[in-house]
């Protein structure tokens, strides 16, 4: 979380420690000095990149579902996050 907004990263880093760096426009998520993910800074509460959301859904909730169902679920949730602002 940065400035009360959530930003995604690949699942292998969830629960671990990452370093946050930022400039006026971007947030940089690093692990052991290596850049993991870059996000454009936003005032939206949820800032997930689609590939991170898909990885989260596929690894847990929908691990036994086919790609079409996973993609539909991810698309729906990404849209809802955008609507939350």
Image (tube, grey):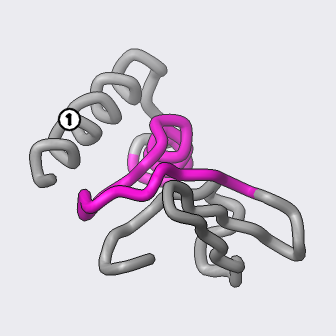
Q: In this rendering, would 21 be left or right of 27?
A: right
Relative to 49, is 20 above or below?
below
Q: Quadrant of residue 51?
A: top right
Q: Please name whichever residue, 8 or 72, is drawn nearer the observer in this view of the structure.
A: 8
Provide residue 24's location: percent of width, then percent of height. Answer: 51, 63
Determine the residue positioned at 66% across, 73% down.
21
Q: Is residue 70 above or below residue 43?
A: above
Bounds of the magenta span?
Answer: 36-61
Residue annotated with mark 1: 79
Task: Looking at this view, name the residue that lies furthest to the left.
Answer: 83
Q: Is residue 50 magenta?
A: yes
From this viewpoint, which residue is outermost toward the right? 33
Query: Residue 64, position in %: x, y?
Result: 48, 36
In the rendering, at what x and y percent does residue 31 appear?
A: 80, 71
- The quarter in which the N terminus is drawn is bottom left
Furthest-top residue in this view: 68
Above or below, 17 relative to 29 = below
**Dot 1, crowdedness within 10 Å: few (<14), some or many (≥20)?**
few
Count of numbered circles on the image: 1
Along the line of sight, the residue nearer the viewer: 61 or 3: 3
Answer with left or right where residue 61 lies relative to residue 56: left
Task: Say which residue appears at 56% left-offset and 62% top-offset.
Answer: 27
Residue at 48%, 42% (x, y): give it: 49
Q: Which residue lies at the image location 45% right of the left edge and 62% below the top edge?
A: 7
Is 81 magenta? The answer is no
User: In the rendered view, would you say 53 is above or below 13?
Assistant: above
Where is residue 40 shown, x and y percent of the image?
Answer: 48, 50
Residue 73, image quadrant: top left
Q: Is residue 39 left or right of residue 34?
A: left
> Disc 1 on helix, strand or loop?
helix
Quadrant location of residue 20? Answer: bottom right
């Amino acid at each position: 979380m940065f400035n009360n907004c959530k930003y995604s990263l690949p699942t292998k880093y969830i629960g671990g420690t990452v370093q946050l760096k930022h400039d006026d426009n971007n947030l940089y998520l690093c692990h052991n000095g290596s850049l993991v993910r870059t996000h454009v800074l936003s005032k939206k509460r949820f800032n997930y990149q689609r590939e991170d959301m898909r990885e989260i859904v596929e690894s847990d909730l929908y691990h036994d579902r086919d790609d079409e169902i996973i993609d539909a679920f991810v698309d729906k949730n990404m849209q809802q996050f955008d609507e939350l602002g």
